[in-house]
Amino acid sequence: MAQMEDKLYPNCDASVWLRSCEEEVSEPLEGELEGEVPSWLRGTLLRNGPGSLKVGSMRFDHLFDSSALLHRFAIDDGNVTYQCRFLRTNTLRKNRAANRIVVTEFGTKSVPDPCHTIFDRVAAFFNPGEAISDNAMISLYPFGDEIYAFTEGPIIHRVDPVTLDTMEQKNMTDCVALVNHTSHPHVMPNGDVYNVGMSVVRGRIQHVVAKFPFSEKGDMFKSARIVATMKPRWQLHPSYMHTFGVTENYFVIVEQPLSVSLYGLMRMMVNNEPLANSLQWFPEYETHIVLLSRETGKEVKRFRTETLFYLHIINCFEHNGNLVVDLCAYKDSKVIDGMYIHAIETMQHNADYANWFRARPKRLEVSLDAPKLTKMTNTTLADLGCETPRIHYDLHNGRNYRYFYAISSDVDAENPGAVIKVDTKTGETKIWCDTNCYPSEPIFVPAPNAKDEDEGVLLSAVVWGGEDSQTVALLVLDSKTMEQLARVKFHTPSPAPKCLHGWFLPRNA
């Protein structure tokens, strides 16, 4: 059995996802530099992700429930420093005060609260901002000159990009009537921010697009408004959405057959069950790609493709009269089950585990003049595991592009911790990897006066498996060649968990 496990999973170390940070790094920590950080690279790389699975003697059941930990790499004149601090959410405060899990999470049921009656829990269904965990441990996005930590619940938290202090929170239910939203809004070149969520419109659930108009001095949340709406394909089972797309003329909504059962959601609230219990996968249904007009806010086109599950869209654009949607596609939603802590711990004994994570970059394409529900062509861009994809966002989001970058999702690869680059025009791929090394989402930073789309660097936060649990590094790659330019290692006072998503804030010279 051991030989079989070695063959299936030669180097995959699950421990990088199971670590709990026990001591924050509030003061900037100096690192050990290997190589040379480009002198033009100046700014702050902020990261977000799971920070601690522990509350007293209890442990969370799902990776998405881990307490949010923020990371900061400050880059200036070839030097890099590191900090990490927990996001001070209401959920974290309640759990720490009780020294146990008292707020039900995505995959974890809290201990019973004798002070809350069944009527309280029913009432909570209509006030998700107060009832649902505000543990925003997925991503970070700028709204004007402010940065916010996101999850899919309606509460987002403002973060100080220098100290990592948690500042005020915003409730999207109060702001623009969103009961949830995606973890990945789009920041447009003019500073406007768009996000997709669910809202109750005239007593019915609808998918909506919210716009937060850019303002240098004003409150972008006060001026927020709904700019597009669509009815769910299944009224009582709206589709689960983690990301969406924007093109020149359309908002692109991928309506997949993983749904949120509204009956299940109500039952969850009443019985204090995890949100994951309300998710249902319908393998008999195809996936729909829906276009909402950016001008009118109405649904104008709906196409279809094979049954698939996705978390992240790579990019969407219009080209030569066609719609192109690139995404990281799975055959089903088992990857969510694969992120339960027990599943991660026992992956070596699960012959199906690697297939659950077998995401591939897919290109869906169709003529914009095609009739409704025309089936889109489906092409695999590369036979490589693909997750947390990034592009040259500022110039190519919603536009024709050539390159994207991601980390491998193939847990049974020879080097499962790999950064990949895919040329969507030629199909050429390039990979960076190192033994026992696990990079996070690579963020592209263009070089000054860059002439080529891929001229710049990739930044990734890196951890190591095995006993080297108290080391984190900033990895700097040449995005053209995928060769390492620099690596800055930091020795942390407690275990360093692997992070998820982040944002780079450049500092102008």
Image (cartoon, grey):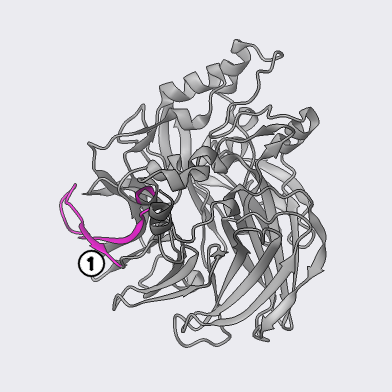
Left-right relation of 182 to 249: right
In the rendering, at what x and y percent does residue 449 appear? Answer: 55, 88
Left-right relation of 407 to 477: left
Residue 392: within the magenta?
no
Q: Quarter-wise, where is residue 380 in the image?
A: bottom left
The range drawn in magenta is 355-381
Q: Is residue 287 above or below residue 274?
A: below
Residue under numbered circle 1: 321
Residue 356: within the magenta?
yes
Disc 1 secondary structure class: loop
* Point 24% across, 71% down: residue: 320
For the question of whether residue 478 can be seen, the reply is: yes
Kindly identify the amino acid type of the residue bearing the numbered disc 1: Gly
Q: Is residue 224 above or below residue 189?
A: above
For the question of whether residue 294 can be seen, the reply is: no
Which of these two is toward me, 480 or 377? 480
* Point 43% across, 57% down: residue: 6
Left-right relation of 25 to 39: right
In the rendering, at what x and y percent does residue 300 appear? Answer: 28, 49
Q: Is residue 6 above or below residue 172?
A: below
In the rendering, at what x and y percent does residue 199 appear? Answer: 48, 35
Count up the numbered dots.
Answer: 1
In the rendering, at what x and y percent does residue 121 appear? Answer: 59, 17
The C terminus - image quarter? bottom right
Which of these two is toward me, 420 or 217? 420
Which of these two is toward me, 165 or 466? 466
Q: Quarter-wise, where is residue 488 in the image?
A: bottom right
> Is the residue marked by circle 1 packed among few (<14), some (14-19), or many (20+) residues within 10 Å?
few
